[in-house]
Image: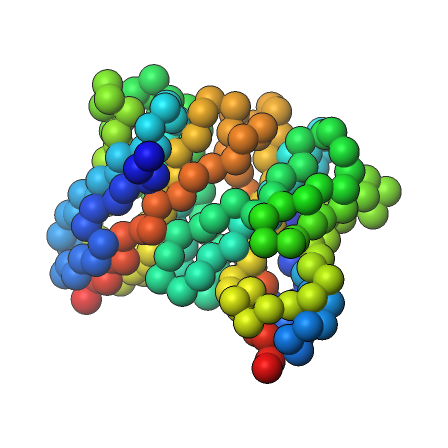
């Protein structure tokens, strides 16, 4: 079975600073990985996905993530934080053999300080 | 193009009662998954429906049941409600190969059990 861990339940950055949200996965077969963002009182929105093509994946709102098999990681980054980036971020994993059951991590709450 | 629509948005029920939540998937999507998100946690997979059949199920008791209709819409039923069932219930729709395309989430139904 696959699983996801997210280091740091809460991350604070200054506006304009680098955003780094950490995600590590566990999977016995090649994974498909996702980052979702959730704003207060809303559902989840897909930021980006890794589906075994390029290891560096670019998403919406200037976010990107790099798949590193050797480190079983899929960290999310953004060069310059904006106030509107404040939200909850979830890393998720699935595999081709799991009939699309997507497993989510516990989430990281991002605060942006003006 | 309407996204995923969930109803109702908020609901208050008493312990022991039964509740039905509804979901209309994004146009063109044929697969519906339901997730439970407790406060401050990541979404937990309940089950998934495809071609009107339950295809996958997470670690939830039989009190949780569902249905998918020929138009791909879906219902989540919870019987004998417990205080611990209070959560945000998210519906996610996808094409069958969700590992390639990701989910589209609704805004959720906030269920409070008193």
- Does A20 sit above or below residue A105? below
Q: Is residue B77 visible?
A: no
The answer to whether residue B64 is left or right of residue A35 is: left
Q: Is any atom of residue A21 visible in this view?
A: yes
Front in this rendered view, residue B54 or B74 = B74
Q: Residue at x 76, y 42 (%)?
A: A56
Image coords of residue A96 (percent x, y): 61, 24
In the depicted structure, whether residue B83 falls above or below residue B31: below
Is B77 above or below relative to B51? below
View extreme (right): residue: A70
> What residue is rendered at 73% in x and 62% in y?
A79
Q: Where on the picture, by quarter, is residue A82? A: bottom right
Left of A12 or right of it: where is A17?
Answer: right
Q: Residue at x 28, y 24 (%)?
A: B72
Is residue B25 rendered to the left or right of residue A56?
left
In what quadrant of the picture does the C terminus of chain B appear? bottom left
Q: Looking at the figure, which quarter contains the N terminus of chain B?
A: top left
Q: Residue furthest bottom?
A: A114
Q: Position of residue A107 (x, y in %)?
A: 56, 59
Colour treatment of the image: rainbow
Report the number of numbered marks.
0
Q: Position of residue A1 (x, y in %)?
A: 62, 36
Residue toward you, B25 or B52: B25
Report the residue at 69% width, 54% height from top.
Answer: A76
Residue B45 % position (x, y): 44, 42
């Amino acid at each position: 079975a696959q699983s996801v861990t997210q280091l740091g339940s809460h991350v604070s950055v200054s506006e304009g600073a680098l955003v780094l949200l950490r995600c590590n996965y566990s999977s016995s077969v090649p994974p498909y990985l996702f980052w979702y963002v959730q704003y207060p009182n809303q559902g989840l929105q897909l930021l980006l996905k890794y589906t075994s093509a390029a290891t560096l994946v670019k998403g919406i709102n200037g976010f990107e993530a790099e798949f590193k098999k050797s480190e079983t990681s899929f960290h999310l980054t953004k060069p310059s934080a904006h106030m509107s980036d404040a939200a909850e971020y979830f890393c998720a994993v699935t595999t081709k053999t799991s009939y699309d059951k997507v497993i989510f991590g516990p989430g990281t709450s991002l605060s942006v300080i003006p | 193009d309407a996204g995923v629509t969930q109803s109702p948005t908020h609901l208050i029920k008493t312990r022991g009662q039964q509740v039905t939540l509804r979901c209309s998937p994004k146009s063109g999507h044929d697969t519906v998954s339901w997730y439970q998100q407790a406060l401050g946690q990541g979404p937990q997979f309940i089950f998934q429906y495809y071609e009107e059949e339950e295809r996958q199920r997470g670690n939830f008791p039989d009190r949780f049941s569902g249905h998918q209709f020929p138009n791909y819409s879906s219902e989540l039923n919870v019987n004998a409600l417990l205080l611990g069932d209070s959560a945000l219930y998210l519906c996610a729709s996808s094409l069958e190969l969700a590992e390639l395309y990701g989910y589209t989430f609704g805004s959720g139904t906030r269920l409070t059990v008193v």
